[in-house]
Amino acid sequence: MKSLNLSTDDGDIEVENIATTNPISLNTDDGDIDINNLKSPSGKIDTSDGDITINKLNSKNGFKINTDDGDIHISMSNFSGYNLNVDDGDIKVKGDSSSDTFTQNKNSTNVLTASTQDGDIKIK
C-alpha cells in the first residue's frame, strides 16, 4: 500500500497489519484510534477526544501523535528519540517517569513527538 489517510468526525479508527511507502495520516474529532502492526516511514495521528493505542509501530522518520483529551499508549516501537508533553497527566517511557515533559535523543531521525492536554503517555 502506498499511503493511508483516514479522517472521521465522530467514530473510532482501527487499523491492523498495514505497511505503507508514504507517510500516513489518521484524524478523528471524537473517537479512539487503535493500531496493531503498522509500518510506515512517518505519520501524523490526531484526535480531539479519544485514546490512541498503538501496538507494533515501525517507522523511519518519526511520528507526530496528539490528543487533546485522552491517553497515548505505544508498545513495541523502534523510535530512537522522544519529545513528549502532557499538561495534566503522567509520562512513562520504558521505566522512566516524568510529570510534564520527556525528551531523549530528540535530534535523531526517528523521533516520536507526542502530546496530550489531559491524559497519560505510556511507551513500553
Image: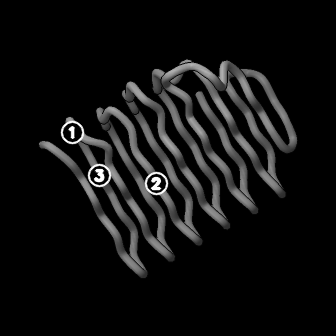
Q: Quadrant of the C terminus?
A: top right
User: Dot 3 surroundings within 10 Å: few (below 14), some, or many (20 or more)?
Assistant: some
Per the image, the residue denoted by label 3 is 15
Tell me the element at label 3.
Answer: strand
Give the amino acid type for the residue marked by disc 2 in the picture. Ile
Please tell me which residue lies in front, 63 or 57.
63
Q: Is residue 17 above or below residue 7?
A: above
Quarter of image, res 26 = bottom left
Per the image, the residue denoted by label 1 is 20
Give the amino acid type for the residue marked by disc 3 in the picture. Val
Quarter of image, res 101 = top right
Q: Residue at x 60, y 40 (%)?
A: 113
Tell me the element at label 2.
Answer: strand
Left/right of residue 113 with respect to residue 100 in the rendered view: left
Per the image, the residue denoted by label 2 is 45
Give the amino acid type for the residue marked by disc 1 in the picture. Thr
Indicate the position of residue 33 as horizontal and vertical percent values: 44, 58
Q: Is residue 97 above or below residue 91?
A: above
Residue 9: mark: none
Indicate the position of residue 34 as horizontal and vertical percent values: 41, 53
Nearer the N terminus, badge 1 or badge 3? 3
Is there a contact, CB below 8 Å, between mark 1 and mark 2? Answer: no
Nearer the N terminus, badge 1 or badge 2? 1
